[in-house]
Amino acid sequence: MSKTRKRRMFGLTFTQLMILACLALAAIGAIFGSFILISSSTTPGGLALFPTSGQPSAAGTADLSAAPNEPGVGPTATLPIDPNEIPPDWVQYTATTIEISAPPQFESVNVADERQQRIATYRSQGYEFLAARLEDDTFDYRFWFNDLRSDNDTYDTHIVLKAGFLPTETLEEYVDEAYGAGLQGFQVADRQAFDIENLQAQRLQLDASLNGLPIRVADYVVTDGVNLWIISCGTTLEEFDPWLPVFDRVARSFHLLY
């Protein structure tokens, strides 16, 4: 009896050859699939989209540096306020040759009545130096503004503008005399030059105490070389610092009409 011999290729039977071919195809498919996965996870420039260990990505946090010029992205810059600019809601007041502006919460009152009333009030409360300062003053009081929102009955926030003539050769000499050793009840806390248009001006801060209540007054002394104006702004010491920029702006609104 003769036996039929199966044909072999490369020393392998047909069945073994088919199994080997299938394994080779599977390996090629796995390699090709890995290549596609890696290619899809990179940008056109070849940079990996996944965060690296050295650059963690915070979930839900916008990258503001990515688009600094985009509207609504990044912090908004606040423009500085011009100290010489008068707010549009301020009220302008004029008297003959001068004008000045004040915030809307300040009420312009009758100067003569207010002056007499304050002299009586200060004297009755024992603030003789305040009463004498008003009573003996030879200046012409042009405006008196009271803060309608002030709730301090002892010394409310107010602004006064008065006019006269410069009695000395220079503004420096006048300030030395008027606010020197003869100043009653007040102590000069600060004195410096101040800019008001093309006029000469100084700002003085004066401290006093009313039966334990500290107060501070900012006097803006202004001259054109002949005439003299004083813009006096007073309030309690506790409220003075927040008010000072407003007082400065009121003083800078002062304008000559000639």
Image (tube, helix red, strand yellow):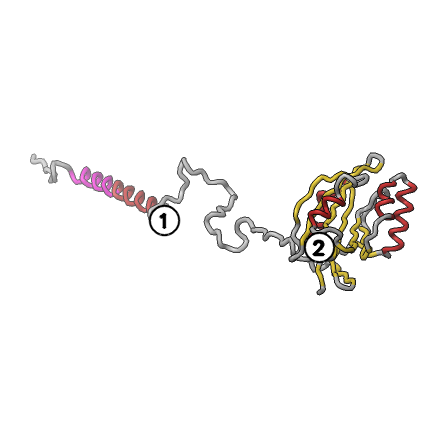
Tell me the residue that label 1 is attached to: 43
Kindly tell me whether residue 225 is visible in this rendering.
Answer: yes
Question: In the rendered view of the protein, which quadrant contains the C terminus?
Answer: bottom right
Report, in whole angstroms, how far the alpha carbon at label 2 lies from the one at label 1. Answer: 72 Å
Q: Which residues, given as a range, are shown in magenta?
A: 13-25
At which x and y percent is residue 88?
A: 70, 60
Looking at the rendered structure, the kind of residue marked 2 is: Thr
- Residue 68's place in the image compared with 191, above or below, is below
Q: Residue at left 47%, top 51%? A: 67
Q: Residue at x 81, y 40 (%)?
A: 184
Give x and y (percent) for residue 44. 34, 51
Residue 24 included in the magenta stretch of the image = yes
SS majority, magenta: helix
* Circle number at residue 256: none
Residue 107 makes an appearance in the image: no
Residue 133 rendering spot, x and y as whole percentages: 84, 45
- Asked which secondary structure carries label 1, the reply is loop
* 2 or 1: tag closer to the N-terminus: 1
Find out whether residue 77 is within the magenta segment. Answer: no
**Identity of the residue drawn at 74% across and 58% down:** 100
